[in-house]
């Protein structure tokens, strides 16, 4: 299992519920193929062990939010007085931006460990309890429509 300390992405997009990380962790080839179409990369490039690990997904390597928090010497946007900044406002994926704007204030309020626990609890189908990933629109298990972000 991945090191939870490497999953607390500075932007608030908790890596433990990321489809890329889940597909890589589970070596789910079908899921990797589906995600490759979403991100415009090969299925082989669908790999990551978390934002704070040495094995980052292609897009996360060049993340300006990650660089910004590193430059400021802070753990994440939850510790920044400039939140929400232009990096959040200009984030290219609407779901990601939505999650950041929701998650960062919560992270500030409850701290890192509890925030990660809450994110893990959030991404379960409320109808059947099946574990899902951030951005999913329908439960794979019971087919119920979802809006968890």
Image: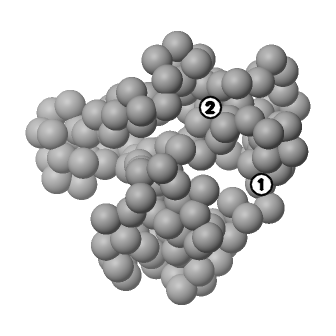
Residue at (31, 72) in percent of width and height: 26
- The first of marks 2 and 1 along the sequence is 1
94 left or right of 146?
Answer: right
Helix or strand or loop: what does disc 1 sit on?
loop
Which residue is denoted by mark 1 in the rendering? Answer: 63
Residue 145 in view here:
no
Residue 109: x %, y % from top left: 52, 13
Between 146 and 48, the one nearer to me in the picture: 48
Report how far apart the C-alphas of labels 2 and 1 lie in the structure: 14 Å
Residue 131 is labelled as none
Residue 104: x %, y % from top left: 60, 25
Q: Which residue lies furthest to the top in this view?
A: 109
Residue 72: x %, y % from top left: 85, 37
Helix or strand or loop: what does disc 2 sit on?
helix
Q: In which quarter of the image is residue 65?
A: top right
Residue 100 is labelled as 2
């Amino acid at each position: 299992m991945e090191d939870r300390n490497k999953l607390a992405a500075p932007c608030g997009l908790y890596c433990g519920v990321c489809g890329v990380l889940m597909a890589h962790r589970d070596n789910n080839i079908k899921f990797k193929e589906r995600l490759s179409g979403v991100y415009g990369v090969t299925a082989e490039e669908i790999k990551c062990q978390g934002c704070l690990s040495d094995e980052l997904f292609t897009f996360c390597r060049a993340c300006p939010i990650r660089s910004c928090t590193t430059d400021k010497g802070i753990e994440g946007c939850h510790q920044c007085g400039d939140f929400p900044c232009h990096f959040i406002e200009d984030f290219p994926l609407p779901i990601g931006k939505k999650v950041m704007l929701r998650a960062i204030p919560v992270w500030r309020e409850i701290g890192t460990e509890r925030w990660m626990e809450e994110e893990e609890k959030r991404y379960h189908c409320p109808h059947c309890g099946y574990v899902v990933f951030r951005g999913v629109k329908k439960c794979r298990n019971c087919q119920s429509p979802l809006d968890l972000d």
